[in-house]
Image (cartoon, rainbow, N blue to C red):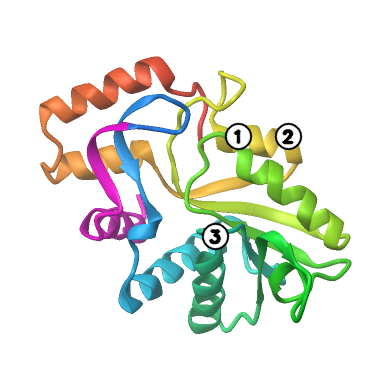
Amino acid sequence: MENYKREFIDFMVESDVLKFGEFTLKSGRKSPFFMNSGAYVTGLQLKRLGQYYAQAANEAFGLGFDVVFGPAYKGIPLSVVTAIALEDLYGASVRYCSNRKEAKDHGDAGILLGSELHDGDRVLIVEDVTTSGKSIQETYPILKAAADVEVVGLMVSLNREEVGRGGVMAALDEVSETYGFPARAIVTMTEVVEHLSEQGLLSEERLRAIKAYYAEYGAKQAR
């Protein structure tokens, strides 16, 4: 596992973004862990978060894209900090773009924030986590309606590696199969468990709960 991934796992835990316990997800599943990117609130946290996204994006997709798009609402700061980090780390000048939940009909009118989208733009989508793929189902039509863009990929913080809506493959893999672009995560839950176990930060009780959860909801294939 790359060092930046280990650092990112520690960063999630230290920032109280990744928690272990018993949580009820929107899907109704009882999960032994929960990730909330809304807990990144300080300037330093946001700076580091952007750097991790930029590193992972460069590793997964290279730097051949023009726009970083973050779906409302949590994706908005992600797109901004990732664009800044790409400039700082690699000198890559990319634009940021996000959407509003509702179109604005005055001033800076429309449904998009930040950069306009143009035909031929190559777009990287950034999100916090994808559990069902619902967000992309809403986001992709917005992008394609704005311009004839090419989505080069989707980058999320954590691949939960549990089955998506289809009940067989992970949600990220479902996104790739449905929309035809790669979907990747900075880290997978397998990597999280491996790293925290090596550090002795997961009790036997926690490990049993995680194992039981994936016995029921784990995807056969996940990236």
N-terminal of the two: label 2 or label 3?
3
Q: Secondary structure at mark 3?
A: helix
Q: Residues within 10 Å of mark 3 (few under 14, many from 20)?
A: many
N-terminal of the two: label 1 or label 3?
3
**Residue corresponding to mark 2:** 178
- Picture coordinates of residue 178 (x, y %)? 73, 34
Q: Which disc is residue 75 wearing? A: 3
Q: Secondary structure at mark 2?
A: helix
| Identity, as a three-letter code, of the amino acid under mark 2 | Thr
The relative height of residue 153 versus residue 180 in the rendered view (above or below) is: below
| Identity, as a three-letter code, of the amino acid under mark 3 | Gly
Q: Residue at x 20, y 22 (%)?
A: 208
| Identity, as a three-letter code, of the amino acid under mark 1 | Asp
Q: Residue at x 55, y 27 (%)?
A: 164
Bounds of the magenta segment:
1-23
Quarter occupied by residue 200: top left
| Residue 19 is one of the magenta-drawn residues | yes
Alpha carbon distance from label 1 to label 2: 9 Å
